[in-house]
């Protein structure tokens, strides 16, 4: 599976799940990831619970559910690579206009290695 092509061609919504160092889990609705290369994705995050959790525990899971009449999509097993506050880079990747002056807080570009891709339903691993 080519992650760039998949996320370009499919519409749907995603949920990212993270946990803090105590293992307390949080899930949040997130847009499709920005595919950096064949094994790297990034998300633009505000300084909220999901962001805080990945700084405490570098492991996350992203579930993407396609908009169709069934249960289709993928689950990505992720490990934090880095975080950046490069606003020019964040603005260039952003899919909607936003400003740090909007009162929503700072934005961070959080980059992950994709460790594994699974089908949404079942445990079938997808080569990528």
Image (spheres, rainbow, N blue to C red):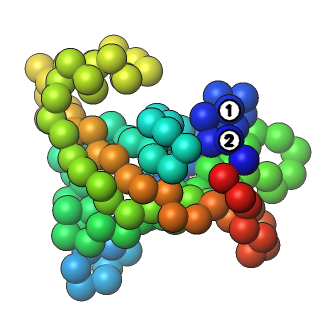
SS category of the residue bearing label 2:
loop
Q: Residue at x 26, y 72 (%)?
A: 57
Q: Can you say whether 87 is above or below 33 in the image?
A: above
Q: Residue at x 27, y 62 (%)?
A: 54
Q: Residue 27, can we see it?
A: no
Q: Is residue 108 left or right of residue 4?
A: left
Q: Where is residue 32? Give x, y as percent.
A: 53, 38
Label 2, on which residue? 2
Residues marked 2 and 1 touching at CB (< 8 Å) = yes
Q: Where is residue 24? Give x, y as percent.
A: 32, 79
Q: Which mark is residue 5?
A: 1
Q: Can you say whether 17 is above or below 123 in the image?
A: above
Q: Where is residue 31? Give x, y as percent.
A: 49, 38
SS category of the residue bearing label 1:
helix
Q: Residue 69, can we see it?
A: yes
Q: Is residue 90 left or right of residue 85?
A: right
Q: Residue at x 75, y 39 (%)?
A: 67
> Nearest the camera: 92 or 30?
92
């Amino acid at each position: 599976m080519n992650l760039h092509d998949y996320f370009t061609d499919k519409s749907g919504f995603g949920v990212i799940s993270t946990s803090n160092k105590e293992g307390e889990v949080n899930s949040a609705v997130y847009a499709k990831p920005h595919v950096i290369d064949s094994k790297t994705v990034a998300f633009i995050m505000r300084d909220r619970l999901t962001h805080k959790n990945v700084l405490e525990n570098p492991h996350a899971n992203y579930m993407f559910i396609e908009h169709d009449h069934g249960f289709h999509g993928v689950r990505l097993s992720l490990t934090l690579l880095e975080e950046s506050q490069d606003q020019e880079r964040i603005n260039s990747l952003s899919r909607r206009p936003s400003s740090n002056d909007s009162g929503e807080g700072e934005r961070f570009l959080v980059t992950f290695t994709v460790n594994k891709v699974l089908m949404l339903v079942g445990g079938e691993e997808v080569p990528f």
